[in-house]
Amino acid sequence: SSIEKLYLSPEFYDFQIQIKQNERIQRTFLCHKTILWSRSEYFQGLLRSQMKENIESKVIFQSFSVNAMESILRFMYTGSMEINPDNVIDILLIAKRLFILDEKLIPFLYHFIT
Amino acid sequence: MSRKMILRVPKFQEPKRMEKSEAQRLWLLLKDAIVEVQHMNASTLSFEELYRSSYSLVIAKRGDILYTGLEEVNNHHTKNLLDKIAQAVDERFLIELNSQWQQYKLQQIMIHDILMYLDRMYVKEPQLKVFDLGMFKWKQNVLIHSQINDRLVRMLLGLIHMERNGEVIDGALMKSLIQMYVDVSLKEKETYKQEFEERFLLATSHFYKSESNLFITNNSCGAYLKKVEIRLIEEEARIKQYLDESTGPKLIKACEDELIANHMQTMIEMETGCRTMIQNDRFNELKLMYRLFQRVENGLVHLKNEFAGYVRNEGHKIVNQPENLKDPNALITSLIEIRNRFEKTLSQSFANNRDFINSVNTAFESFLNENDKLSESLALFIDKKLRGGFKDSNDQEIDVIMNKVILLFRFLSDKDVFKKFYEHYLAKRLLSGRSFSEDLERTMISKFKQECGNQFTSKMEGMFTDMRLSKDALDGFKNYLQTSVEMGKLPKIDMSVRVLTQGFWPTFPPHSCTLPPLLSQYCDLFTKYYCHAHTGRRIIWQTNIGTAEVTFRLPKKTHVLALSTYQMLIMLLFNDAEKLSLKQMAAGTSISFMDIQRSVKPLYSGKYKVLKRTPAVEKSKELSENDIFELNLNLKCKLHRIKFAATSQTDSEPERQHTRQRVDEDRKIEIDAAIVRIMKSRKALIHNDLIVECTKQLSSRFVPQTSMIKKRIENLIEREYLERFPDDRRRYRYLA
């Protein structure tokens, strides 16, 4: 779909997500506030706060798995992602922490782990 | 995602237990941040860092430190705010309170957002959610504090009072402050209801109680109604502008109670009130009154009763007015007029409300049956219309009038009396050839048929059939005369005969008279012809309702006089006499003296006088047997053909009595039939039940008197249709 085209594309991006590990930037994702806002309660809070991240349009996550973050972003834009034994736990952690808005996602992920 | 796969995954790691000191460090970090937020210094804070801290605490099962800490911080903060707000004076108070409140709300949202993980994963009932906790602290420490609450409510109510008196106030400020009561209510808006709404409604009732009392004493009812309407619109707007919508129905109810319900009686009775409005057809004011009264319980009942009472009263006046009692046309015309007028009131003011229509109809029913004149008057009214009164109306207007007639007819309780009169006048119209249009006659009859069914109109239709068949018979008779042998011997006269089937037509009182020999011969010829063509039939001549044309030769001029048969007979006598007394006329014609009187009257007292009384006695109207008449040879008239009324226009009292008697005769038969029908199906019945049942069955035609039913029952027992139970005299048994 046309929203899919926006995923990780630099067109019209207005927000950056940086993953840092040991004070080193691992990866910068270019994103769109509207998508983030509509798919995550964490971002809803962040984007209505008057704090640093909202002013700078950038958030830095420490010690997130880059691959898992990418999967989560893909899911936020497209509604689908690939899950495998190696990334499922990292994905679950991020999904729970960011309150990704999808009532089936968390139960589904738990299904693999138990 | 729907495909089920089993994957082997590494074991989910339990988070490490957190040292208490580490937890304390994280809380202090958050606490500082919250204090910064409360001082509106959020821009240097990192959302993610704070979120991560609270997340870590919750993951490490240290949520309790966070939650109790938050409670303390909020507590402290709100207590500080209270002092700040309470210090503000006059109108600064509301502005300060509002701006602190608006900020506080934003802060609480931000605090909720960074503590989102705590809110979702840690807080359990009966603990308050993070945001609700903030609201609760505000309520506890600020809003319902004795230094705030009463002052705030008084000021809000004061502003509303000012606005009701026409001043402009800050609606946005009102909305924000009133909404605060809703926001801090934890469930079902309890704080709003307890602290604000209740007092507001009380103040509203109070305000409108004194305003309405004052206004209604100094203004007309119409002005008051308009005022009320405006007030209600204003209050509706107030709800939208700054009250919680749940207050809407209560506020409107309070206003309606004070403005409408408490003054209904006054609005009806006051000099400029409902009564006057109805009297003067003030449709718009009544419409407004209807709309407003509709809003309160039983409001419309008051209005309806008042209106129905007025209708009954007006109707009562009309049916008892002496002029109307003498003039059926005026009576029915006035009735149609008020009916139209009230229908207009109903449609323009009372939205054609069914209850109103019904009560007006009930009123009509009661006054229309107040006296027994109406049946005949209505029949006479139609008679006049169908004799030519419709001449100048178009089809649509005629239809309207006919429908109004049907409407009035519907209210009559003695429809059988009306029917008798209607048949009577219909017969007269047909026989005298005075009916203006057969089409209209039939239209009218079809309307009665629609209303009452075939049985009601079968006789009337029979009359029309007779008229048609008579024409055929007459044509046949004329042909017969041409071929008849006897014809050659007789001078030709133009005779017209109508054959009326007995039963269809009203029975005319039998009168006898002596016809001139020539006419008598013609009559015999017709009888011979007709009875030959229709064997088994018998002809009875009814000369008293016939008409004739007579040539009247004056010295200089010749006229044709259109007369009744009786008048013709009287005039013919003058061929052999110059002067005749009434007694002599009666002797010469065998007509009863009363009929002579009635027939002679139009001949000497109308516009054209063919007879004159000698000696002339102008004033005296009563005729005596010995009054003498002679032909008026000086008659001056430009017309060639002069038409004379057969008798005076309306029926004489004896004729009316006769019609009444026939109605009573018919009623006996109808009651007998009803009793037999009922008893046949029920076999046995108690006296009272039989009376009730019988009255019910007959009510569509007339209202039978109980005494009459009793007599008929006795009669039926004598005739052995019924018998009394030997052990219970009040019960009857049907005898097959």
Image (cartoon, grey):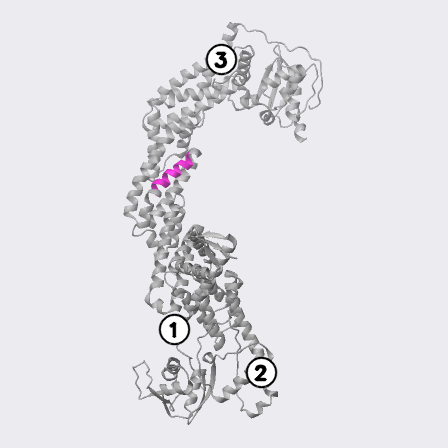
Q: Which residue is mark 2?
A: B477
Pinpoint the chain carrying mark 3.
Answer: B
Q: Label 3 near label 2: C-beta < 8 Å?
A: no
Count every numbered label the image shows and give the total: 3
Say if B309 sits above or below B162 in the image.
Answer: below
Residue type marked 3? Leu
Say if A68 sits above or below B323 in the image.
Answer: above
Residue type marked 2? Phe
Q: State the CA–CA distance, disc 1 to disc 2.
A: 36 Å
What's the residue at 33%, 30% (across, down)?
A: B155
Please tell me if label 3 and label 1 are on a single chain.
yes
Q: Nearer the viewer, residue B403 or B59?
A: B403
Query: Of the numbered discs in the image, which one, if any, rests on residue B66?
Result: 3
Q: Secondary structure at mark 2?
A: helix
Question: Horizontal and vertical percent for residue B367?
Answer: 37, 59
Instruction: Specify start and end residues of the magenta stretch as a single range.
Output: B247-259
Q: Label 2 near label 1: C-beta < 8 Å?
A: no
If you read the primary sequence from the N terminus, does the residue marked by circle 2 or circle 3 appear first?
Answer: 3
Q: Which residue is mark 1?
A: B654
